[in-house]
Image: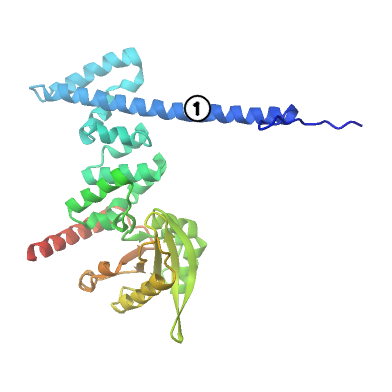
């Protein structure tokens, strides 16, 4: 019985049936790649078109002398465009385009964003009231390649308001967003949050630190997502031998974007000043024994059920790379969370302004 011999050309694909399979896979790959590239190009082209339409309508509306002029222009234009080009140019759609051009006035920034963000992404952004908030979500979405669903989840969870960055003066926020835009550079202020929402852990009203740690390990994927960009799990209860004593870090992560080890200490109660010394010990040990030559100094996160602002300020923990944050095991109503976060942001900015004034 003769065996089928599959011939191969030197340096080329296999011949025969195997060669046909190889060819089919290769052609399929080319088709799929081209489809994706074409879809991305069409999306970018349409989004830029919508921006230009909004810009042009805005110029016409600003030239009107009556308040009702803009309403009349948009309505009349929508009727004509819808008749010629379909529902995509309804009055509501034109108002979205007008808003788009108003809140993203720089075409260079828009041209950069449309490579990753779809028109639906922009619709989730354009009605956010705060300019820095819009720019933060837009650039984070570009860098992290969030889907529309992920972007909306981050906005709903008030990610921007929970970052350490939001508590900085406006000039600092602008500089960090500019660095993210130009260099894709993530800083600890962009990554670290307060509070962390751990409602997915399913903890009861009473629990021990070990219960909290066990729950985190059970839900490690959700915990890493809540921690934010670039976190990778390294160890649980990492043992440190110092002199003749053993110490244990609850959780250790590595952040690829920051290029730093991150030690996390879990506390079931409110923050206490002595926690600072404990975390400093952990960070100095990691810096000496675990940090690679090309990495930045380790960071520490102390997760507590509560904290007192003046204690945190007096201890100046930021100077030592220590971030103290509350965690919420039950997500409060959005209105309450919003109130708490905006109050915290205002207090932090007032404190920084007073400190700068004193200097």
Among the 4 quarters of the image, the one containing residue 194 = bottom left
User: Residue 212 appears at what percent x and percent y?
Assistant: 45, 69
- Left or right: 80, with 268 as reference point: left
User: Residue 85 appears at what percent x and percent y?
Assistant: 34, 15
User: Residue 306 appears at what percent x and percent y?
Assistant: 31, 69
Residue visible at 27% across and 58% down in the picture: 164
Q: Secondary structure at mark 1?
A: helix
* Colour logic: rainbow
Residue at the right extreme of this rendering: 1
Task: Name the quarter where the N terminus is drawn.
Answer: top right
Residue visible at 40% across and 27% down in the picture: 41
| Callout count | 1
Residue closer to the observer: 74 or 104: 104
Residue at the front extreme of this rendering: 10
Residue closer to the observer: 273 or 253: 253
Work out whether residue 120 can be spotted. yes
Indicate whether 132 appears above or below 62: below
Work out whether residue 158 can be spotted. no
Residue visible at 41% across and 69% down in the picture: 205
Indicate whether 84 appears above or below 221: above
Task: Name the quarter where the C terminus is drawn.
Answer: bottom left
Among the 4 quarters of the image, the one containing residue 137 = top left
Residue visible at 44% across and 71% down in the picture: 250
Q: Residues within 10 Å of mark 1 (few under 14, many from 20)?
A: few
Residue at the bottom extreme of this rendering: 244
User: Residue 56 appears at what percent x and percent y?
Assistant: 21, 22
Indicate whether 334 appears above or below 206: above
Q: Which residue is mark 1?
A: 34
């Amino acid at each position: 019985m003769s065996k089928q011999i599959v011939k191969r050309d030197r340096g080329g694909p296999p011949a025969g049936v195997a060669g046909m399979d190889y060819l089919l896979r290769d052609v399929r790959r080319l088709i799929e790649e081209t489809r994706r590239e074409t879809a991305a190009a069409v999306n970018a082209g349409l989004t830029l078109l919508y921006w230009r339409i909004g810009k042009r309508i805005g110029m016409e509306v600003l030239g009107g002398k009556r308040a009702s002029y803009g309403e009349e222009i948009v309505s009349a234009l929508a009727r004509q465009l819808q008749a010629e080009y379909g529902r995509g140019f309804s009055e509501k759609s034109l108002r979205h385009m007008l808003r788009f051009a108003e809140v993203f006035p720089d075409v260079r920034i828009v041209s950069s964003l449309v490579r990753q963000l779809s028109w639906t992404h922009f619709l989730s952004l354009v009605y956010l009231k705060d300019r820095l908030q819009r720019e933060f979500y837009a650039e984070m979405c570009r860098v992290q390649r969030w889907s529309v669903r992920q972007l909306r989840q981050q906005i709903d969870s008030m990610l921007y308001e929970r970052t350490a960055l939001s508590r900085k003066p406006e000039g600092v926020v602008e500089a960090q967003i500019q660095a993210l835009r130009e260099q894709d550079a993530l800083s600890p202020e962009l990554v670290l949050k307060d509070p962390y929402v751990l409602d997915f852990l399913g903890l009861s009203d009473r629990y021990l630190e070990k219960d909290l740690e066990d729950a985190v390990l059970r839900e490690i994927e959700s915990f890493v997502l809540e921690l934010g960009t670039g976190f990778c799990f390294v160890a649980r209860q990492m043992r440190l031998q110092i002199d003749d004593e053993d110490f244990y870090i609850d959780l250790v992560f590595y952040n690829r974007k920051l290029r730093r080890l991150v030690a996390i200490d879990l506390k079931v109660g409110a923050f206490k000043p002595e926690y600072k010394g404990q975390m400093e010990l952990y960070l100095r040990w990691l810096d000496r024994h675990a940090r690679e030559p090309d990495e930045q100094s380790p960071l520490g996160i102390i997760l507590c059920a509560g904290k007192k602002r003046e204690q945190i300020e007096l201890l100046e923990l930021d100077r030592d790379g220590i971030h103290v944050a509350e965690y919420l095991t039950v997500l409060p109503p959005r209105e309450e969370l919003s109130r708490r976060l905006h109050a915290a942001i205002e207090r932090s900015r007032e404190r920084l302004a007073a400190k700068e004034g004193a200097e």
